[in-house]
Image (cartoon, grey):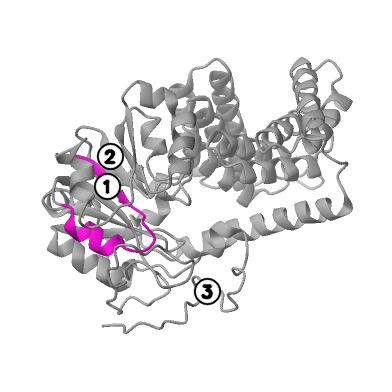
Amino acid sequence: MAGKAQISRKGKRTTVSTTLTRLKLTKALVLQQQGLLQEAKIICEDILKEHPDHFDCLHLMGLIALQGGDYLQAAKLFGKSVDIHPHNPSFFYHLGVALQELGELDGAMTGYDLATALKPDFTEAWYNWGNALQKRERFAEAVDCYDKALASRGDFAEAIYNRTEALKELKKQKEPTMTITAITEMYNALQLRIQYELHMQKIKEKLPEGRLEHYEFKVYSQNGEDGVITEIFNRIGTTNLSFVEFGVENGVECNTVFLLSQGWNGLWMDGSEKYCIQINETFNHYIQNKELHIRNAFITRDNINDLIKEYYTGEIDLLSIDLDRNDYDVWSHIECIMPRVVVAEYNSKFPPHVNWHVPYEADKVWDGTDYFGMTLLAASELGKRKGYVLVGTETTGANCFFVRKDIFDKARDKFNYPMSVKDLWNPARYYLFTAKRILPGNTSGCGHPTSGKFPLLLS
């Protein structure tokens, strides 16, 4: 009839669908706030089947994971929300919270920075940013963040208390007022962190499904080894939750601290007396409870078995090797234990077809150049001779991972991706953990500075 607006059936269906989705999401939100996480999750999963890019639903799923203690999954979901809708300050804030729970303070602070840029009076974001800065012992910046939190909520008791504590620490340090140079450095570090996250995403999106790089995360390891080790044992299971790691330095950044914190037991060895003293102070609780053994010794291929078998023999779950030079010969001589998983450093400066390792000299240590360790092919061939299968490397090109063949054979379907040395090799991306594009004295940006020795490489 003339003069009357007409609405198509398609338009009505779209309106009804949108309304139903909104009602479902509201119900899921109420359930989440009531602590009924599983019920809320089921509704969200139902919504995402029809609307996989529903950023509000992805965000709510992230909140459910965060509330349930699954911080890694929460970070992934919040990251998807941010990718789809990068203008919501709450998405960046909760991404920061999840990363902070994972110990990724730099990433967390990036999230809070972006959240407060979008919403300058975001009280909780300023507060958590201050907490992260306190952990970094950047007390002046932490006080500034607490001030901004209190500017919008003057009765915020936790912010008042933490600000007072930061001021106490600041007085101890006699920290000067933040200079223009410091602000510039902070800005540059933030930009570099954002570039890092985007670069890592581009690298990994090209890899086959199931590759271990997809599971990387850092709690206490140097790079993403904590996540890779966790995923390997998710696939093959554990036995006695025991480990041996040597070359741990002061212990605060190595491949087994995260395992130790989860109830594992093990042996750490390092050649530095200074580092071993620091370990005894820092990890005294674990040592007193006999969950951690410390041995100060200069490791050679001739003494390695005697050192280990004072504490462990037979099957253990994990062996981690990081001597920075004689890794190949020391691993080749280990006979007193049968680790189910081996993590070893490899020299990723050299391409995957090169079969080379440093000639053994018992009294030599790494000189900081590219003359160290073993290539990935050399490590793989040694692993085969010792009964191990190379299952992956991590993105920075620092470590490779092996599973004992009898265990691998039972779990072969869980490593369903190309597994040649060429396929698994990652080049030297040390800039990813040095926060620099290249290392000092290394104008190529690839690996460590040259030693000038140029050893004979066998392919």
Decide if residue 286 is on the left or right side of residue 438: left
Residue position marked by numbered label 1 in the rendering: 319
* Disc ID at residue 243: 2
| Mark nearer the viewer, 3 or 1 | 3
Q: If the image is split into quadrants, where does the N terminus sit? A: top right
Q: Where does residue 297 sit, x and y in percent of width and height?
A: 33, 46
Res. 420 in view: no
Check the image and report above or below for 144 versus 423.
above
Q: What stretch of residues is rendered in magenta?
A: 316-334
Q: Contact (CB < 8 A) between labels 3 and 1?
A: no
Of the image marks 3 and 2, the number of the one nearer the N terminus: 2
Check the image and report above or below for 450 versus 256.
below
Of the image marks 3 and 1, the number of the one nearer the N terminus: 1
Q: Where does residue 203 sit, x and y in percent of width and height?
A: 49, 64
The residue type indicated by label 3 comes to Pro
The residue type indicated by label 2 comes to Phe
| Mark nearer the viewer, 3 or 2 | 3
Q: How far is mark 3 from mark 2, CA to CA?
A: 32 Å
Element type at mark 2: strand
Q: Where does residue 323 sit, x and y in percent of width and height?
A: 36, 56
Decide if residue 300 is on the left or right side of residue 397: left
Which one is in front, 109 or 95? 109
Q: Where does residue 105 sit, x and y in percent of width and height?
A: 62, 41
| Quarter assignment of residue 392 | bottom left
Residue position marked by numbered label 3 in the rendering: 449
Q: Which residue is depicted at the point 23% across and 51% down?
A: 414
Element type at mark 1: strand
Which one is in front, 197 or 178? 178
The residue type indicated by label 1 comes to Leu
Q: Contact (CB < 8 A) between labels 2 and 1?
A: yes
Residue 322 lies within the magenta run = yes
Element type at mark 3: loop
